[in-house]
């Protein structure tokens, strides 16, 4: 006579129930319970998975690849142009949030702009996070949300990334590294080596806004009219410009400002560049900050401004194309390329005198971007 099978069946059912509960917990929406970043959030375990699934993936519309790399169809890229553009940048700005932006949106804008001024259509970004233990989770969530919003508004996707956590005191809250991939249309080539005497230099708006905004955000100055950072993606403005006129060279005016870029161009082209100081657009608030601290707005960083060089015959058409775009409403001709004084940049002042405009030895405002 065989023994009844009920105890075995009961044990089997109990095991199934236990497994079902475990599986349900695994698939239950995870939530980061900590108020601040912990070492475990970078350790590769459940805490890190919670951070990724609760904060990072939702901010980036779940577009980040589950594998260790993002994959693209080369045929799709080839349809957009003949060259691939690839860039990388790291952002260490302090404070993390400031009037007009934050480290997250600025990381997206800055990497897009590095691609755009080479003529590329930005497509994909990566996001590498270095988090310090103790960083408030709510602040991290705010910055990641801003970063995702900036990418969506610019029409690019954040598709891969990495997260590391370092001990307290080994970093300053949050650093972000981004890389960007884009495609340059066939036949488009811009380089400082293409400059010719007589070419006109244009910028798309007021200079020094970002540098002044960071100074004020650090509490070093108090102004009745706060200055906003100009952080913005320039790729659509660039596309409008290169479709309207031939562009010899282009650069975004970040660290070192206008002064750094024109000196690099003069050196690369072995030509002289002359800046007309009264024509350079600068907000009165920014000019006031510079006068108080003995700074020159031509050396201040920007996060939404570029310099373009076009043949003189196309200067007005270039201005028209820029001014039709919201980020180019204050576009202006600020100088020209000359054959005099090769490798040297001169500036014509409002007093009718000339002086040499050189690069600074270092950045007057560290950790500006």
Image: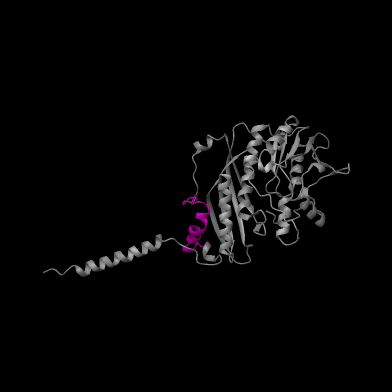
User: Total marks drawn?
Assistant: 0
Q: Position of residue 189 (x, y in %)?
A: 65, 34
For the residue pair 348 and 70, the one nearer the viewer reads as 348
**Residue 326 falls left or right of residue 289:** left
Q: Main secondary structure of the magenta part?
A: helix
Decide whether residue 45 is among the magenta residues.
Answer: yes
Quick one: quadrant of the N terminus?
Answer: bottom left
Which colour scheme appears in the figure?
one colour
Name above or below for residue 356 compared with residue 36.
Answer: above
For the residue pair 329 and 145, the one nearer the viewer reads as 329
Q: Position of residue 193 (x, y in %)?
A: 72, 35
Residue in view at x 61 percent, y 67 percent:
168
Image quadrant in which you'd find residue 202:
top right
Image quadrant in which you'd find residue 29:
bottom left
Image quadrant in which you'd find residue 5:
bottom left
Decide whether residue 336 is among the magenta residues.
Answer: no
The boundaries of the magenta stretch are: 42-66
Residue in view at x 58 percent, y 45 percent:
154
Residue in view at x 28 percent, y 67 percent:
14
């Amino acid at each position: 006579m065989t023994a009844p099978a009920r105890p075995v069946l009961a044990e089997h059912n109990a095991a199934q129930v236990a497994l079902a509960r475990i599986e349900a917990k695994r698939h239950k929406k995870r939530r980061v319970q900590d108020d601040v970043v912990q070492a475990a959030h970078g350790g590769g375990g459940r805490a890190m998975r919670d951070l990724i699934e609760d904060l990072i993936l939702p901010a980036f519309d779940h577009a980040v690849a589950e594998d260790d790399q993002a994959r693209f169809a080369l045929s799709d890229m080839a349809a957009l142009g003949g060259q691939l553009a690839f860039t990388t940048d790291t952002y260490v700005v302090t404070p993390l949030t400031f009037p007009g932006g934050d480290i997250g949106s600025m990381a997206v804008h800055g990497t897009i702009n590095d691609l755009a001024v080479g003529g590329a259509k930005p497509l994909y970004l990566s996001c590498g996070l270095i988090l310090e233990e103790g960083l408030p989770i709510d602040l991290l969530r705010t910055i990641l949300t801003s970063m995702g919003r900036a990418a969506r508004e610019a029409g690019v996707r954040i598709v891969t990334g990495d997260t590391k956590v370092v001990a307290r005191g080994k970093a300053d809250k949050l650093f972000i590294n981004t890389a960007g991939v884009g495609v340059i249309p066939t036949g488009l080539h811009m380089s400082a080596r293409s400059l010719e005497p007589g070419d006109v230099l244009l910028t798309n708006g007021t200079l020094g806004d970002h540098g002044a905004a960071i100074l004020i955000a650090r509490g070093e100055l108090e102004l009745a009219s706060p200055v906003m950072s100009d952080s913005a993606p320039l790729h659509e403005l660039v596309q409008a410009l290169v479709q309207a006129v031939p562009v010899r060279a282009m650069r975004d005016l970040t660290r070192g400002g206008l002064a750094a870029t024109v000196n690099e161009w003069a050196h690369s082209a072995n030509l002289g560049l002359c800046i007309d100081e009264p024509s350079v657009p600068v907000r009165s608030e920014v000019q006031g900050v510079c006068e108080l601290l003995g700074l020159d707005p031509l050396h201040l960083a920007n996060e939404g401004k570029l310099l373009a060089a076009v043949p003189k015959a196309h200067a007005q058409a270039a201005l028209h194309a820029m001014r039709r775009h919201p980020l180019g409403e204050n576009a202006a001709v600020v100088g020209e390329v000359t054959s005099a004084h090769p490798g040297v940049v001169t500036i014509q002042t409002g007093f009718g005198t000339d002086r040499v405009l050189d690069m600074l030895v270092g950045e007057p405002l560290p950790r500006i971007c």
